[in-house]
Amino acid sequence: MEEQLIFAWAMIFCIAIAPVYGEYYSKTVTPSSKVEKVTNLHFFLHDTLSGENPSAVLVARANLTRKDHSPVPFGSLFAIDDPLRVGTEPTSKIIGNAQGLYLSSSQDASKFTIVLYADFAFTTGKFKGSSFSIFSRNPVTEAKREVAIVGGRGRFRMARGFAHIKTSYFNATTGDAILDYK
C-alpha cells in the first residue's frame, strides 16, 4: 500500500512539474498576402425548356390557386443541364455545361426572379475538368444583373467572385433563353 502511495505522489509531482519545463509546441505563421488571380470568362448559356431535347426540365411545381400561364410559374423547380457555348447560335461550339437547379422565386411575374444553384463545368480548352459554382438570386427581368460565384474545383478551386449576366434571347411563350455570361 505504501509503495502505491509513493508511486501516486511521484506521478502527481511529475504531472504538476511538466508544464514548468515544457515548451509550447505550436508555431504561429503569419498569413502570406498572395495576389489573387482574376479570370475573365465569356460564354453563352443556352437554356431550353421546349422541344424534343430540353436542357431544363420541371421536377416540381406548386399547387397554385391562381392561373399562371408562365412557362416558369412561381414555386417551380427545374433541373438543368444547359450547354455553355462560345456564341448565341445553337450550332456554336460547346465548351461545357451548367448542371444544377433553379427555382422560380418571385410571386410578381413582372419581377421574374429565380434562385440558381449550379455548377458550371468546362469540357474543353484551358479549363477542361474545372468548374465554378453559382448560388445566387437572379432577377431575370433586369437588363444586366450579377450573380455570386461561391466556389469551384480544378483551376477554380476556392473561387469567389461574381458573374455579370445579360439576356441575349428570351421566348416568353416557351421559356427558352440564351444568357450572356461575363
Image (cartoon, grey):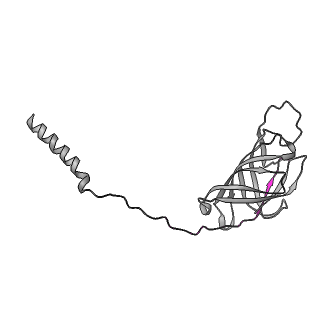
Question: Which residue occupies the extreme left position in the image?
Answer: 2
- Above or below, 130 against 47 in this view is below
The picture places residue 36, in percent across and down from the top left corner, at 60, 67
Horizontal relation, residue 122 to residue 75: left or right? left
Magenta residues, start to end: 31-51
Most foreground residue, 138 or 157: 138
Front residue of 51/146: it is 146
Of 137 and 82, which appears nearest the observer? 137
Q: Residue at x 78, y 49 (%)?
A: 55
16 up-or-down from 42: above or below: above
Residue 144: within the magenta?
no
Q: Residue furthest front?
A: 20
The rendered magenta stretch, by its main secondary structure, is classed as loop
Q: Residue furthest right?
A: 173
Count of numbered marks? 0
Find residue 166 and report its horizontal and vertical position in percent.
Answer: 81, 59
Look at the image and tell me in which quarter the C terminus lies.
bottom right
Residue 60 in which image quadrant: top right
The quadrant in which the N terminus is found is top left
Q: Would you say 134 lies left or right of 63 here? A: left
Query: Percent position (x, y) of residue 88?
Result: 84, 61
Residue 41 magenta:
yes
Q: Is residue 70 left or right of residue 78?
A: right
